[in-house]
Image (tube, rainbow, N blue to C red):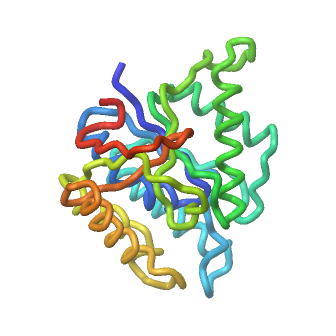
Amino acid sequence: MPNHLMVIGAHISDAENMAGAAMLKHRRAGWEVTIVHLTAGDKGHPTLSPEAYNPMRIADAQASAAFVGANLEILPYQDGELEVTDDAIWAVADLIRKYRPTVLLTHWRGSFHRDHNNTHEIVHRAMFNAALPAFMRAQPAHAPRAVLYPENWEDMEGYSADVYLDVSDVFDDYLKLLKTHALMREGYASFRYYDYYEALGTVRGALAGYQKAVTLMRPHTLLHFTRQPSLLLD
């Protein structure tokens, strides 16, 4: 069975922004990849209603998953209203059991966005539920070997860059992946997402001695960062 990378984001485009380069790198190395969006993130358009924006967001999520070659799961929770509930915890736990990821990436809890913080909490509670065989569900218990938090501009309070992953070989395609989202293509957001992540790859690469890099945080911060030229389990 191949290794499997699962990325869980609060809204459509969060997973791609913070972990798109890592997804591309691992997919090309033969890993399976699964993207999970807890909400559609459809309340953020400056002029469109959520009802009008939602189909665009779903189409973008499908396009980005196809670009990566990833499985796609979009859960039915509401943008801006995501709560830490048993229903949400079990929905994620069941996906962990279904796809059996080797490594799981999700939001760091130090965010100014409540949906991101709640996603962090949901995922950690879900990993506990997913790992216990005593919880009888449709799929057997499973525990990922590692969980890490990719760098996200909205999740930087207390964030520490522990792992510098060399993504020089996939960075051009990472930028193409970002442009599968109208949020990036059309520039209607108040924040310059595309410019930020494009520049961040250069800055993190300079710090690590790579052309382009992305960073991730471990659950317990180490005193010294790790340069990671290959994959997250090497």
Left or right, 102 with reference to 55: left
Residue drawn at 54 percent across, 60 percent down: 12
* Residue 166 visible in the displayed image: yes
Left or right, 46 with reference to 63: right
**Where in the figure is residue 162, as x and y percent of width and height?**
43, 46
Left or right, 47 with reference to 196: right
Q: Which image quarter is the N terminus in?
A: top left
Left or right, 177 with reference to 96: left
**Where in the figure is residue 2, as x and y percent of width and height?**
34, 24
Instruction: Please determine whether, in this image, residue 58 is positioned above or below residue 198.
Output: above
Residue drawn at 40 percent across, 44 percent down: 224
View extreme (front): residue? 223
Q: Which image quarter is the C terminus in?
A: top left
* Residue 176 visible in the displayed image: no
View extreme (top): residue? 134
Of residue 147 and residue 59, the one placed in the foreground of this image is 147
